[in-house]
């Protein structure tokens, strides 16, 4: 093999390891490098050979070893995968290339017939059926536990088998509740160490909720756009990808050479600290604690810079590798062939240069979007204007701030055709929840108002509490008189996984149940999702012809993006709702749309893109006692 090739692949490996390294904090759970590669690897078609590097194969073998160890497989078998992973990651020759040259892989150290076949399978098909099988048996999040310092596969195995701990959140809970010390071989000291490790892991960076960051971003965007010489301002990074929280804001500005943009940026009145300031870049901390990075670029490389700074890093790395395979170089200044810029003025030109259609920012997480783009299978993502109504709205009859009429008018202003009035039920005394009498009274008011309203229909509903035993907080005789029933959990968050799942499943099975509100129960940065078997719930929802909510409240954004995708795969429609408590809250819907787009949802996957005529029969199905 020529020397140059060896050096190149060694550098490439280094960059890969560096490039996919993720900061350790709880908010990134599920988005680590291995997860990203995993979802991609499940769908890569045969001709994607070039996406597989030695390091990719090593990652797969390492994960197999971890999962086998958690499954108590034969130690020799586990060791074989670990050794092969190490060997592959250190091997300077590219295994895919060796295979192409007809090299017999069993000549590599530690590679027998079985492993050689697995490597071939990975290189030629992009996935490994053994790993696919293991993922079916063990929750994918479990490998995240291995990232907590001090937790190896043996401990993870004990935690999973004895305490049913599958996620870092559950681990945290178990440690806080003192359950870990009861396990053989753990003890109080280990429990404390685990607790500290999780907290260190979680606190490594302060993140801002998307809606909060949007406020700072909007103001700064206006300020920057008004600076002389500035022709374009965009916020890139995780903000543009609509992640539910952002670590910092990445502003990209096109400006002419004489523009005082950097000086004026650092002079912005919210700046409390200037971390760096050069001629084309700067970083500052705002009063809020939010960091803002600024990059100034020329119009000719705007698209390349936007692509680079939008990320995600994992997405960029894969695109860059594709470019390398085609003899191209991509960086934040453009796409180059032999030092000549061939693309980069627009983002679309960057994708076109590597033979791909434009990929929307919300999909750029290296979760299969590149393969989908290549195969012409990118989803046509839902947009805000696709919504025809909102199925979760409160009024001042309970804890909202505006009247029925005011909420109806606000809905009309959004271009909606219907909104469902979903007050809390009696159990939520602090919210002045409705009992049967008050609910039926509200139904009468709605009937009267509907007779008067033009272009807007109020649907009669309730956000009924799901009690701890799975019953609903109001009798069937009352619920049966509504257009739809929205059910929600507001208490008993700490039930065991089995009990919580059973509770929610029972509620869904009630004769009048339509929509499960904020299904995971998490409050961003305040309360972890409750422990529940979401797939089971989604399947029950499907079975009953019911629906799931994606609650757009900035603190909820619940369904999670990955769960949206799960719902889509299971064929369950999602309703993107504001949970408005005032006329202003419909504005939250845009974040719900962002989350839905991150979850690959299209217009057809979303219940409330239906017009009222199409919606009614879907709701009716859930509202017949025989269903
Ligand atoms: P955040 O701020 O933690 O919510 O997440 P991002 O994605 O906004 O990350 P950030 O602010 O560190 O960087 C913005 C983008 O810049 C990132 O999404 C991709 C790109 N980027 C940053 N560092 C690297 C790198 O080392 N390699 C590559 N390929 N891209 C990078
Ligand atoms: Ca950022
Ligand atoms: Ca940044």
Image: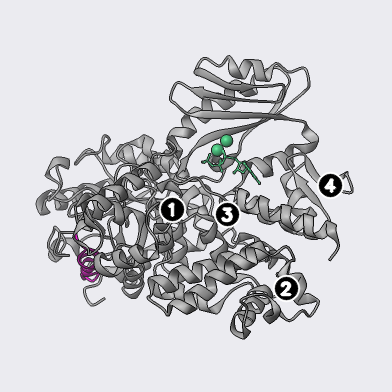
Identify the mark nearer the N-term, 1 or 4.
Answer: 1
Q: How much space separates mark 3 and mark 4, taking CA atoms?
A: 25 Å
According to the picture, the residue beneath numbered tag 3 turns out to be 363
Q: How much space separates mark 3 and mark 1, taking CA atoms?
A: 17 Å
Query: Range of the magenta residues?
Result: 495-511
Crowding around mark 4 (Cα neighbors within 10 Å: few <14, some 14 to 19, many 20+) is some
- Label 2: state its secondary structure: loop
According to the picture, the residue beneath numbered tag 4 turns out to be 336
Q: Which mark is residue 29?
A: 1
The x, y position of residue 424, in whole percent, is: 20, 48
Q: Is mark 1 within 8 Å of ligand 1?
A: no
For residue 211: magenta? no
- Label 1: state its secondary structure: loop
Ligand 2 - quadrant of the structure image: top right
The x, y position of residue 500, in whole percent, is: 22, 63
- Label 3: state its secondary structure: helix
């Amino acid at each position: 093999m020529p020397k140059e090739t060896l050096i190149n692949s060694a550098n490439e490996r280094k960059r890969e390891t560096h490039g996919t390294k993720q900061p350790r904090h709880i908010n990134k759970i599920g988005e680590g490098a291995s997860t990203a590669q995993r979802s991609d690897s499940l769908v890569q078609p045969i001709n994607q050979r070039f996406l597989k590097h030695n390091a990719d194969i090593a990652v797969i073998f390492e994960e197999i070893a971890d999962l086998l160890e958690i499954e108590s497989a034969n130690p020799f078998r586990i060791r074989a995968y670990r050794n092969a992973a190490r060997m592959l990651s250190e091997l300077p020759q590219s295994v895919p290339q060796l295979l192409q040259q007809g090299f017999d892989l069993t000549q590599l150290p530690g590679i027998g017939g079985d492993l050689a076949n697995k490597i071939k399978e990975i290189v030629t098909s992009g996935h490994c059926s053994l790993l696919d099988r293991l993922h079916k048996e063990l929750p994918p999040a479990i490998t995240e536990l291995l990232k907590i310092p001090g937790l190896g596969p043996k401990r993870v195995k004990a935690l999973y088998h004895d305490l049913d701990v599958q996620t870092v959140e559950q681990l945290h809970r178990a440690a806080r509740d003192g359950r870990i010390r009861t396990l053989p071989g753990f003890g109080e000291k280990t429990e404390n160490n685990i607790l500290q490790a999780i907290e260190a892991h979680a606190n490594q960076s302060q993140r801002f909720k998307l809606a909060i960051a949007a406020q700072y971003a909007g103001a700064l965007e206006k300020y920057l756009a008004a600076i002389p010489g500035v022709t374009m301002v965009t916020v890139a990074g995780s903000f543009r990808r609509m992640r539910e929280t952002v670590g910092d804001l990445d502003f990209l500005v096109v400006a002419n050479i004489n523009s005082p943009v950097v000086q004026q940026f650092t002079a912005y009145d919210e700046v409390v600290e200037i971390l760096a300031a050069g001629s084309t870049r700067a970083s500052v901390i705002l009063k809020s604690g939010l960091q803002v990075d600024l990059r100034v670029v020329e119009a000719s490389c705007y698209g390349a810079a936007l692509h680079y700074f939008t990320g995600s890093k994992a997405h960029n790395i894969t695109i860059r590798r594709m470019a390398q395979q085609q003899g191209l170089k991509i960086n934040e200044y453009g796409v180059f062939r032999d030092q000549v810029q061939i693309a980069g003025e627009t983002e679309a030109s960057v994708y076109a240069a590597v033979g791909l259609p434009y990929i929307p920012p919300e999909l750029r997480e290296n979760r299969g979007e590149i393969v989908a783009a290549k195969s012409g299978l990118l989803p046509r993502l839902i947009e805000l204007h696709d919504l025809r109504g909102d199925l979760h709205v409160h009024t001042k009859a309970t804890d909202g701030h505006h009247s029925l009429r005011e909420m109806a008018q606000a809905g009309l202003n959004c271009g909606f055709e219907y909104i469902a009035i979903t007050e809390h039920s009696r159990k939520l005394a602090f919210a002045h929840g409705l009992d049967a009498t008050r609910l039926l009274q509200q139904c009468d008011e709605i009937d009267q108002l509907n007779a008067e309203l033009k272009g807007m229909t109020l649907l009669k509903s309730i956000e009924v509490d799901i009690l701890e035993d799975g019953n609903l907080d109001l009798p069937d005789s009352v619920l049966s008189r509504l257009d739809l029933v929205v059910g929600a959990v507001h208490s008993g968050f700490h039930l065991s996984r089995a009990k919580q799942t059973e509770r929610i499943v029972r509620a869904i099975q009630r004769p009048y149940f339509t929509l499960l509100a904020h299904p995971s129960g998490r409050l961003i940065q305040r309360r972890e999702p409750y422990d529940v078997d979401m797939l089971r719930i989604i399947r029950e929802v499907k079975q009953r012809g019911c629906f799931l909510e994606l609650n757009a409240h900035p603190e909820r954004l619940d369904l999670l993006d990955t769960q949206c995708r799960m719902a889509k795969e299971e064929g369950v429609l999602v309703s993107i709702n504001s949970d408005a408590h005032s006329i202003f809250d419909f504005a939250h819907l845009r974040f719900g749309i962002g989350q839905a787009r991150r979850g690959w949802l299209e217009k057809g996957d979303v219940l409330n893109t239906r017009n009222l005529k199409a919606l009614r029969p879907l709701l009716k199905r859930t509202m017949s006692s025989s269903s």
